């Protein structure tokens, strides 16, 4: 773990990458399994296809591929990394999947650990990694958001299964004099957490005479869609507004609105609240659905690679989801032009 210069108190975002799950599943395919239709799903969510991992595709495969691609864009060797931070709610191993990613990348000098904050996980991880860089204790970090919610969706529950997909995205960040992370706000409210859960199994078994135990494991995702929707359209504009005021930045200065991709109607509602024109709203929901911790770096990487997001552009980002958890960050992209 290399120490940064005591003058390096800023954070520069300079590389991105992403990786896709192997299988494309259309709305019409889901319509053969549950009572739904392409028209219903598209009009309520904006989703037309999602990607689902093949049975042998591990989370660490997706995360490593995304990370490798971000390292290549940044022009860094894996050995130069001090930190691999993996945002995920669906690790291959509950003890942590980041070390497997560290090994796959060959990031032999990096400490690696997981961070779980559901769909806010990437944003929370970006901010967490930035703190190590700001204090000067680390110089280079790879922040990865990766999830395979397909493994925890009830594919017979039409109210939730149409929303989710798998994927991974990554961002390479470095300590720098020129600070690209203008500000952030993170929020949690566990008292409202019951509207979106991936709960532990709750059945007990006999262990021995006079002793019972509960076996580990999880039930499929349980969601109150309407309540989650109301939460998102209330809290996301509020936290973004708060952040913009604290940073003294007006919405007109934002080049891109980079929101967690949960529902096109949520993206549109937030954009309308700030009068941000639709072409400035990054969206790839149509092709991926909600990939949880992966959505923000995934859509960012697409926009960087197709030349929409360019060096110097200002992005207002917000993540939100289970917990409940939400937050916002304002940053300047400083990757290759
Ligand atoms: N296909 C067809 N009909 C469906 C359906 C589907 N996939 N899912 C639900 N319906 C039905 C419901 O059963 C209900 O029928 P009913 O009136 O006969 O009871 C009707 O459609 C309306 O359901 P409702 O839940 O009111 O729909 P909605 O407009 O709120 O849309 C969501 C549902 C899930 C798309 C929407 O609430 C949403 O996007 N919420 C946020 C979810 C989210 O983003 N979660 C992750 C956050 S990180």
Image: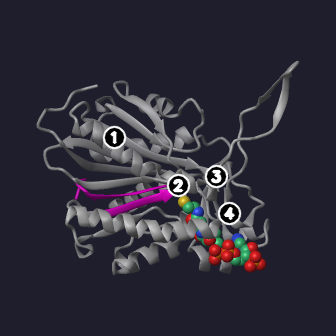
In the rendered structure, find residue 129 and report the number of the disc placed on it.
1
Q: Residue at x 51, y 43 (%)?
A: 116
User: x and y percent of residue 229 in the render?
Assistant: 56, 69
Q: Mark 1 falls on what kind of element?
A: helix
Residue 135 makes an appearance in the image: yes
Mark 4 Cβ inside 8 Å of ligand 1: yes
Which region shows up in magenta?
A: 315-337
Mark 3 Cβ inside 8 Å of ligand 1: no
Q: Residue at x 74, y 55 (%)?
A: 154
Q: Are marks 4 and 1 in contact (CB under 8 Å)?
A: no
> Spatial distance from mark 4 to mark 1, Cα to Cα?
32 Å
Q: Are marks 2 and 3 in contact (CB under 8 Å)?
A: no
Q: Quadrant of residue 130?
A: top left
Q: Mark 2 falls on what kind of element?
A: loop
**Image quarter (top left, top right, bottom left or bottom right) of the N terminus:** top left
Label 1 Cα neighbours within 10 Å, binned few <14 / some 14-19 / many ≥20: many
Nearer to us of marks 2 and 1 is: 2
The answer to if 322 sits in the magenta stretch is yes
Label 4 Cα neighbours within 10 Å, binned few <14 / some 14-19 / many ≥20: some
- Most distant residue in the right direction: 209
Looking at the magenta stretch, what is its main secondary structure? strand
Residue 290 makes an appearance in the image: no
For label 3, the residue is 197
Label 2 Cα neighbours within 10 Å, binned few <14 / some 14-19 / many ≥20: many
> Spatial distance from mark 4 to mark 2, Cα to Cα?
17 Å
> Spatial distance from mark 2 to mark 3, Cα to Cα?
10 Å
Q: Is residue 298 above or below residue 284?
A: above
For label 4, the residue is 160
User: x and y percent of residue 175 in the render?
Assistant: 21, 40
Q: Which one is nearer the viewer's eye here, 60 or 236?
A: 236
Q: Earlier in the sequence, mark 1 or mark 3?
A: 1
User: x and y percent of residue 325 in the render?
Assistant: 48, 54
């Amino acid at each position: 773990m290399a120490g940064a210069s005591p003058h390096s108190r800023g954070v520069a975002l300079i590389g991105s990458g992403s990786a896709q799950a192997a299988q494309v599943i259309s709305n019409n395919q889901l319509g053969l399994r549950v009572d739904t239709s392409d028209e219903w799903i598209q009009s309520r969510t904006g989703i037309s296809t999602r990607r689902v991992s093949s049975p042998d595709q591990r989370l660490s495969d997706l995360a490593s591929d995304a990370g490798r691609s971000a390292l290549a864009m940044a022009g860094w060797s894996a050995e130069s990394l001090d930190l691999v931070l993996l945002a995920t709610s669906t690790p291959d191993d509950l003890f942590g999947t980041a070390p497997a990613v560290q090994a796959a990348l060959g990031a032999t000098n990096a400490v690696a650990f997981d961070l779980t904050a559901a769909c806010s996980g990437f944003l929370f991880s970006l901010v967490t990694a930035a703190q190590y860089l700001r204090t000067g204790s680390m110089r280079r970090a790879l922040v990865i958001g990766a999830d395979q919610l397909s493994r925890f969706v009830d594919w017979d529950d039409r109210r939730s299964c149409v929303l989710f997909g798998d994927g991974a995205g990554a961002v390479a960040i470095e300590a720098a004099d020129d600070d690209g992370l203008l500000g952030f706000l993170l929020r949690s409210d566990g008292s409202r957490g019951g509207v979106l859960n991936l709960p532990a199994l709750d059945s007990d078994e006999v262990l021995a005479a006079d002793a019972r135990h509960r076996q580990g494991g999880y039930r499929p995702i349980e969601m109150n869609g309407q309540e989650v929707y109301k939460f998102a359209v209330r809290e996301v504009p509020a936290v973004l507004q708060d952040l913009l005021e604290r940073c003294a930045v007006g919405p007109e200065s934002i080049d891109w609105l980079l929101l967690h991709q949960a529902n096109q109607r949520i993206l549109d509602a937030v954009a309308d609240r700030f009068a941000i024109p639709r072409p400035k709203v990054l969206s790839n929901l149509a092709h991926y659905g909600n990939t949880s911790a992966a959505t923000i770096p995934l859509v960012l990487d697409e926009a960087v690679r197709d030349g929409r997001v360019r060096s110097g552009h200002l992005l207002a980002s917000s993540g939100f989801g289970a917990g409940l958890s939400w937050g916002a960050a304002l940053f300047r992209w400083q990757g290759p032009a």
